[in-house]
Amino acid sequence: MKKILNIPVTHEALTLITGMTYARVPFWYGCTKEDLKMDLVMPKNTAGHASMPAVLWLCGGAFCVVDRSVWMPQLIELARRGYVVASANYRTSNGAAFPSPLQDVKAAIRFLRANAADFCIDPDRIAVMGESAGGTLASLAGVTGEMTEYETGDYSGTSSAVQAVVDFYGLTDMSTLSGHIYDTNVPAWTMDAFLGGITPDKLKKTSAVNYVGKNTPPFMILHGTADITVSMANSQNLYDRLCESGVPAEFYVLEGAGHGDDRFYQPEVLELIDQFLKRHLP
């Protein structure tokens, strides 16, 4: 059978770059160096391509494990909708306590911005998005802007500020720990390792709600009513603080959704995320 087909191009071809090093950080008791990697989905044909908004995704894992590839199948649709999508690993609590993972996230943002022309990225339209521990770090990256104590590594003259944040059920108010987290399936040692020892000062520094101000970028927050891992009080407190500070904020509560629930990755939610990003990364 022979047929002549006239196929319209409804979307461009994409390419996946895997295992790209965005930073080198101390490893093995400070004696060696570790390469931090990211994966990137971008247009295959870059010659003369218009710049695009970018989304940096951060995987969760209770601060002790991370895999940049896990959620990439769910993120491809964002790339289809016109975003360059990056997913980055960061140091976990078995190797480095806070603020190291936040410093890594900011290094990833600087890397994308400094190399924007190579990746078809508009350096003025970068969002950060993450789930669970990744939501915690995405929120912290969003609210800390260019605070010098969290800026380390290469591209020191490049901004790590983002223009929008999407937080999936992140731990954003550590004051909720004492009344919630030790009664769930998140063990105390997880937070102790992430913080490098639980103290009031460290709980304050790792709570995104404490950094919210008039220069905070727009936030979209998602949380499920059946989440027994991270209390919804985190998202509610963050949303309230954003509203009090006059920061554009959207809070979506998913009925019956647990922590990491498939409901968060359905087309209806993706559409909400896309519309939020289009409003704030015009």
Image: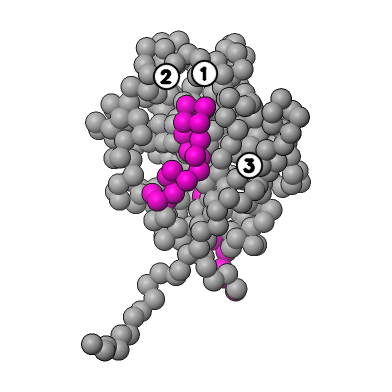
- Closest to the observer: 42 or 166? 42
Whole-angstrom CA distance, mark 1 to mark 2, is 8 Å
User: What is the span of residues highlighted in magenta in the rendered image?
Assistant: 48-75
Instruction: For mark 3, give the secondary structure.
Output: strand
Q: Is residue 73 magenta?
A: yes
- The residue at 47%/64% (across/down) is 14
Q: Earlier in the sequence, mark 1 or mark 2?
A: 2
The reply to whether discs 3 and 2 touch (Cβ–Cβ < 8 Å) is no
The residue carrying mark 3 is 36
The residue carrying mark 2 is 186
The reply to whether discs 1 and 2 touch (Cβ–Cβ < 8 Å) is yes
Instruction: For mark 1, give the secondary structure.
Output: helix
x, y percent for residue 196: 61, 17
Left or right, 214 with reference to 150? left
Circle 2: residue type = Val
- Closest to the observer: 218 or 74? 74
* Most common SS among magenta residues: loop
